[in-house]
Structures are given as structure tokens and as C-alpha cells.
Image: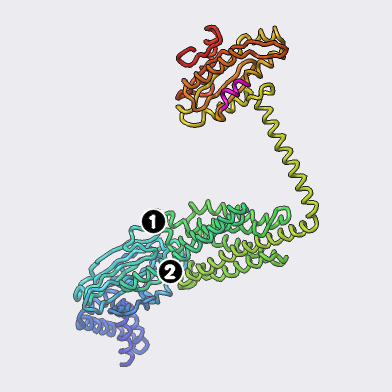
Amino acid sequence: MRKNNNTFHICVKETDLSVCGRIALGARSKAVPPGVRAWQQACIAALIGMLLLSLPGASRAFAAVSGNACPTLDLAFGQPDVPSLPHLCFLQDETQALGPDDVLAGRLPMDRRDASELVFRHNQSAYWVYVPLRNLERAQRVWYLQLDYPLLDEVDAWVYDLDTGPGAAPVLLDMERMGDSRPFDARPVRHRLFLLPLEFGPLQSLAVVLRVRSSGAINVPLSLHSGGSAIGWAQDQGLSQGMFLGALVLLALFNAALYLRLRIRQPLYNAAYIVCAGLFLASMSGLSFQYLWPGWPWLANRSVPLTETLAILSLLWFTRHFLGIDPDRWPRQSRLIRLLARAGVALFAASLFVPYALIIKIDTVYALACMVAMFGLGLRHLRRGERAARWYVLSWLVFFAGYLAYGLAAFGYIPGFMAQERWMQIALGSQMFLLTYAEVMQLHDLMDRALGIEATARSSLQHEVRARTEDLRAAMGALERANRQLRDLTLHDPLTGLLNRRGLDEALDQFAKSGEPAARGVLVIFDLDHFKRVNDVHGHDAGDAALRWVAEVLVNLLRRRSDVLARFGGEEFVALLAATSLEDARILAGSVLDHVRRHPVDLGDGVTIPLTLSAGAAEWRPGDTPQSLFRRADENLYRAKASGRDRLVADGAAG
């Protein structure tokens, strides 16, 4: 009789009646002769049938998973949050052919495990999880079911109402499709993790059926939060993530400032490493998908291997420059870094099209190989007594502690991904701080060394340096004076002291670029009439005296600082009258012509030469260039000579 009771007790707990039959038959097979087994089976079947008919709702208990197999979690007001759901029912769907009705109907046996232990390494299966919940309050309540692992491709959730009456099937209330393979806006709650809101009526029982599938490792750390605590938890998480990423941004900006100030490459590579590693963590935590590319599920899936490879490449080049691995001095170490860098570039390209499940494993092996290589290089330089290498090695020791735990959790070897994520942030932030501190210490040592060399040189060679400095200053002063004299010679006419043709061209270019067109002024070209006759009759010395006389008249009558006077060539002179109207220019030019006409050149010994000038004037117009302005003034000069000389012809009139 005791054996029969035990058999019945086991059968009541089973969800598959055929299993119960096998257990009962197994329990009696050794005690009863074989000829009576058929009679025993009939009795057991009748007993089970009577039990099903006598218990209200018992058929529903055996037809659905929500019976004794999966305990219901009771929720009450004031109850603390459940950080990890206990005793969850789950099953592995290797063919990916099951649906939520199969889970509800209980046609397949389900295992039970706490949510913190629902950790599975990569495979091609989907996983189903059944979560029955009951509201004990006589009021409506909102709870949030949270899945704390953001790196899942597909997370499908069905919410059923279990209070449908005896024998009735559960009613589907809601269905959500989430995951990295779907747009971020498809989630019911905009959060980096997977949050499913559950609205309970008074004393209502709900069941959540989850289907999880991913191309990487699968973690299903489910927790439950009330409405108020979910908001507070999200705020705390956002604050901590923001503070961490903000600290990384500050470190990156500090290194970028070092690069801009000192123009050495290692702070630039350190800044690149900080940015890429920050993006890697943001991708692993789901923040990149939430804020950077919510409409790009493909990029959200690929961002993890891409940013991981970029971070390693940046760190490789930082190591090369920080440890001073020069190809001439350290050929083997330099070849190793170049080999690892080329492999990283190839993996970065492969990450764009190789399946995620494969490339993430290759990237992880590559990252570990690079980390071990860089750590070994740091140890080798530390043994040589390099002070900065000790901080470099220490940064790797801190980093390895967090990276190994984080990697094991991400690949499903250990539970507690969220806890390992916080530890990884601490380890990575500490490594970045130590690397930056090592940079500063290295620069400090270099500055101390430079200051020591400078002090030694100052004490031993101070006298010589001072003497050479004075010699250099004297030489620089002489060179500057020579340059000024050379410039004067190249820009001025040696006979008259006025600008020559080259100086005039520079003045015209400046004239064309300055001020408004209406304020730029007038160009006047003067020409000595019958100058060849002066040279032929009186000689070239008399001709030179005449040219100097005209230059003196121009300087005395047109001596504003803004005006430009030049000897254009031979007997032609140019006056550039800035900010002067055409009428004023006519008056000034007329006074020059009148003065030359009334005052002959005195050659001494009572010999004088009468001179006259012809002039052409052109006013700057909109659209003019120095060439067009000079051309018009020259045309007006030609008209003045053609009309009898000793006169001025300006734009529009002759005088």
C-alpha cells in the first residue's frame, strides 16, 4: 500500500500522463506476476481518470504548464523587487519548431532552474521560459519583467491571462518582439535592456512565455520590478552609465589636448583607444543600439566585433610609441606589432560579412593574443628598468582581472553578466587612467631629463652661449638691414628715389584690394615733353637733372602719405592718388603741370632748360583692375600728347 501511494504522489507531480503510467508499471512490475499486468494497468488508468474527474480544474492543471510543475510567484504591494526569479521552467528547442501553445500545453518536459543560472553557451537552439505570476492585491498593479542581457538577437514574449475559468484555455493579452535583430523602437519600453510591462488586474494571474534565440551566448537573467522601483532603477543605471562614459570622454579629450599641444602621436592613439573601447562597452551594454544607431539592427549586431578590433589596433600603436619600439632598435618587437596590426585590419574587414557567431570567437582569441603580447612587451621593458613601463604593466594587471570575468560571463561560462559589466567598467576605466598617468609620468621624466641636460649645458657653456648669442644677434641685425636695403634697391628708382616699376605693381595690387571702389582714387601718368631733345642738346647729365627735378616737384606737390609716386620708366612718372575724386585729381595734376611750365630746370652757370609735362588721368570704376585702370590713364596720356602736349586729359574731358 505504501508503494501505491508513492507511485500516485509521483504521478500527480508529472505533466505527461504516459510518464506516470510508466512509473506506476515500473513500481509494480517486480511484485506482481506478468499475467496480472493488464488488469493492473486498467485499474491504474481508471484511478487516474476518477481523480481527473473528481478535482475541479484538474484537467487544466495537467493540460498546462502552470500547474504543479512551475510554481507561481505571488506579488503583493510593498513586496521588494525580485533580483533573480527562482525555479523557472525552461526547455531547449533544438529544431526551433515550437510555439507558445506547445509550452502552455505542457507537451514537452521542462527543466527548472533559477534565472541567474539560465546561462547557455553558443548553439543553434532557441530557449523557452515559462513565468507564472499572481497579483495578491485587490487593486491594479504594474510590474516590469526585466531581462538583464542586452546581446540577444531575438526575445519574443507572450502574456496570457490564466483566470479564464475551469477548463478554459489561457487568453493571449499581449505579444512583443524584441532583440538586436529588430529595430530598437519595436521594444515596448525604450531601454538598453529588455523590459516587459505587465498590467495586473485585482487578484489576476498572468503567465509570460519567453522565447530567446541568439547567434552568440545566451543569458536569461530575469528579474522583476514594481513600477516605481523600475523607474528609479533605470535612473540609477542611466546615471552610473553616464558618469562612466563621461569620465572616458574627459580622458579622451585630455589625451587629444596633449597631442595638439606636444604633437607626439601616443596621446592620439590613447585617445582613439579610449573612444573605441568606450564604444565597445556601449555596444555590449546596449547603449549604442539605444542612442547611436537604433534603426540599424545590422550595425548593432556588428558593432561589438568592429569596435573591439578598433580598440585593439589603437592600443597596439599606442604601445609601439609608448614603449619606444623602434624598428632599428627593436626589430623583432616591431615586426610582431606590425603582424598583429595587419591581422586586426583583416579581422575588421571580415567583421562586416562573416557570421557573428564565428567572428566574435575569432576576435576574442585575437584580442587575447594581442593583450598577452602587449603585456609581455611591457614586462620586457620593465626588466630593462624603464620607469614608465611599471605603470603600463600595472594597467594590464588591473584590466585582465575585469576582462576575463567579463568575457566568461558574455560567452555564457559564468552567470551574473550585469555584475561582471560593472566590474569590467571599473577595470577598463582604471586601465585607461593608469595608461594616461603613465603617459604623464613619461613626459615628466623626459622634461626632467631635458632640464638636467639644459642645466649642465648652462653651467659649462654659459659663457660661450652668451658670446655666440651676441654674435648671432649682430649677424641677424646686419642681415635685417641688408634685407631692407636690398628691398629698397629692388623697389625704388636709384636716380629719383621714387618707386620703380616693380614697386608700382605692388602698390597697385594693394590699391585694388583696399576700401570701397568709390574711395580708391585716381591714377595719373605724367610724361616729359620732348625729353629726347633735352638729352640730345644738353647731354644725359642734363636729362638726369630734369628727371630729378620732376620727381622733386611731384614729391612737394603730391606729398600725402597715402599717395604713391613712381618713375614708371624713362621720362614717365605715375601718381596714385588714394581716396581722391577725379575733380580734385585734375586740380592737383594741373598744379604740377603749371609749376613745371613756370620753373625751368637750372643747370648752373646760367643755363636753364624749360620743361613741360603731359598727363593722363583715370578714375577707379567698379569692375576695374590695376591693368584696366593703367590702360585708360595711358590712353588719356596719348590723347594729351596728340592734342598738342603740355596738358592733362582725364576720363571724359581734356584740360
Q: Give the crowd class for mark 2: few <14, some 14-19, many >=20 residues within 10 Å.
A: many
Q: Position of residue 277 (x, y in %)?
A: 52, 60
Q: Position of residue 581 (x, y in %)?
A: 47, 23
Question: Which quadrant of the figure contains the N terminus?
Answer: bottom left
Secondary structure under tag 2 reads strand
Residue highlighted by disc 1 = 294
Q: Nearer the viewer, residue 437 or 432?
A: 437
Q: Nearer the viewer, residue 346 or 601?
A: 601
What secondary structure predominates along the stretch shown in magenta? helix
* Residue found at x 66% / y 15%: 546
* Residue found at x 59% / y 53%: 261
Q: Amino acid at mark 2?
A: Asn
Q: Is residue 482 above or below residue 177?
A: above
* Residue found at x 53% / y 66%: 429
Q: Give the crowd class for mark 1: few <14, some 14-19, many >=20 residues within 10 Å.
A: some
Q: Quadrant of residue 363?
A: bottom right
| Region in magenta | 552-559
Residue highlighted by disc 2 = 219
